[in-house]
Amino acid sequence: MSLLNYLLGRSGDERLLWTGEGWKTVADACIIARQIRAAHTDLEGARVLLCPQNDVEMIFGLLAFDGFVDQMLLIAGNTTDDEIKQMRERCTVDRVVDLSFSEFVDLTIEADGEIDEVRNTKWIVPTSGTTGTPKLVAHTLDSLAFTVRRNQTVGSDLVWGMIYDVTRFAGIQVLLQAVIGSSGLAVVNDRQDVSTAALQFSKAGVNALSATPTMWRKLVMSGVIDALDLRIITMGGEPADQKILDELIGRFPKAKVTAIYASTEAGVGFSVSDGLAGFPSDYEKGKLRGGNQLRVLDGKLLLRKVTEGGTYVGIDESITDTKGWIDTGDLVEKRGERYHFLGRASGAINVGGQKVHPTEVERIIDKVPGVSMVVVSGRRNPIMGSLVEAHVVALKGVQTDKLKEHILQACRVHLAGYKVPASIKFLDDIPTTLAGKIKRK
Amino acid sequence: MKSEIVKKIVEREFLGALAQSGVDVEGEISAEIRLLDSGLDSLGFAILVTTLEDRLGYDPFTLMEEAVYPQTYGEFMNIYLKFSDHLSADVTA
């Protein structure tokens, strides 16, 4: 079943999409999606790249093209041309689709009537990338929507807010939860500006929101979170700490607060709704709700999915081992009856849900004249979860004040803001505990 | 007084962080100003907390039993002042 068919199965007068200019109903959305198909008959069965200007365009593109094209590569608005080029080397694209659909609005098309479809469209989703180029993961609507809650009575009272990029795995989950779960969805122009977004969400009547713990902290600090009457609070993308859980449970005593463990590769693994950080150690025994399994091996979290998950595109690498287990790369530690997240086995640093690989920062700092050795690691932070920290050994006779400025300058030129070290410490030598990752000149 | 030292350092580092983000502040910072409207984004704010931990020798957000997420500059300052006993002995304003 395609996304459009799910939509056609809903009552046409239900509110579906709030865009700041008011609501579009399910019937409106069906018409727009069919108009897009009618204007793009040549794309039937093609492999397309969707590169939208905004979330609304992307959402209509997904509604129109799932079940219609063979595969769609979803590109976030902030992806660089270089990154797109690298992705296209690994994933064949027949056509790049311009999603500005305003030109179709004159076509008269009926909203009703199920569409016969045979295509099981592949959704190609870039991972949040640790070492430069993101990997591409192919999913189908079935693998993406497996954990969507489908209780129509509950769903019809909910309006979800879209604060994730809709081209990313977490954003797709929110979209599918709204479309398939019989709910409404509110989309804002500028997701980065949380204060304005929260006010718009409040106008739209948003009562269900999924965000990273860092976004939640930002929403709390903005002071406008109280404008929302939240009943469903979910978080993912980085470990939820006890403080933000307590804060949200205290503010919204009637809301169901759930931490979701998911990744682009594995899809949704499991969820935790008991208000505590980490997850119960008895999750290891037997099956999880939904049928997935997890186990901890040498401190690493492994998952086995009950359904088919994603597969890598264009690289000869399997997401699962021969027995179906996925190495999530997340390190966990058992304390009492609970497992807690320690970080990534690769050493990747999770800065508010965005991953930074230490080597990409070390490579830049290593080239700065005056640097003898550098090791980059994560430093815990109450706002963003972690920040990037660099420990540097300067060459003899080099003034560290100036060197620090030069390092920061180099990093600001070559790296995204969240990858630039938040603190740089000078040492006489790199401690042996960190020696695994040091680079020597 | 430890609290005087803490106040001065927090003020200076906050202004420094704003300047880093290209925001010039004339005169005193109002206690009512909302942190996320001040010109700092959440990353800038997170970095400020890290810088202050290095300068003062403590991070009040980690020391707090219950989470407090400050909305205004005044609330932010009070969180640091509340834990000013933790100021490292060798720190001067």
Image: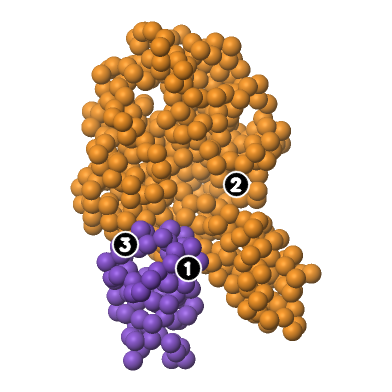
Chain colours: A orange, B purple
**Where does label 2 land, which residue?**
A129
Q: Looking at the rendering, in which quadrant would you find the N terminus of chain A?
A: top left
The chain containing the residue under callout 3 comes to B
**Where does label 1 land, which residue?**
B19
The chain containing the residue under callout 2 comes to A
Task: Respond whether the residues carrying marks 3 and 1 are from the same subunit.
Answer: yes
Q: Position of residue A200 (x, y in %)?
A: 30, 41
Q: Secondary structure at mark 2?
A: loop
Q: Residue at x 44, y 55 (%)?
A: A239
Q: Residue at x 68, y 81 (%)?
A: A399
The chain containing the residue under callout 1 comes to B
Residue A168: tell me if it is visible: yes
Q: Quadrant of residue A152?
A: top left
A65 or A136: which is nearer to us? A65
The amino acid on which the numbered mark 3 sits, given as a three-letter code, is Arg
The amino acid on which the numbered mark 2 sits, given as a three-letter code, is Gly
The reply to whether discs 1 and 2 touch (Cβ–Cβ < 8 Å) is no
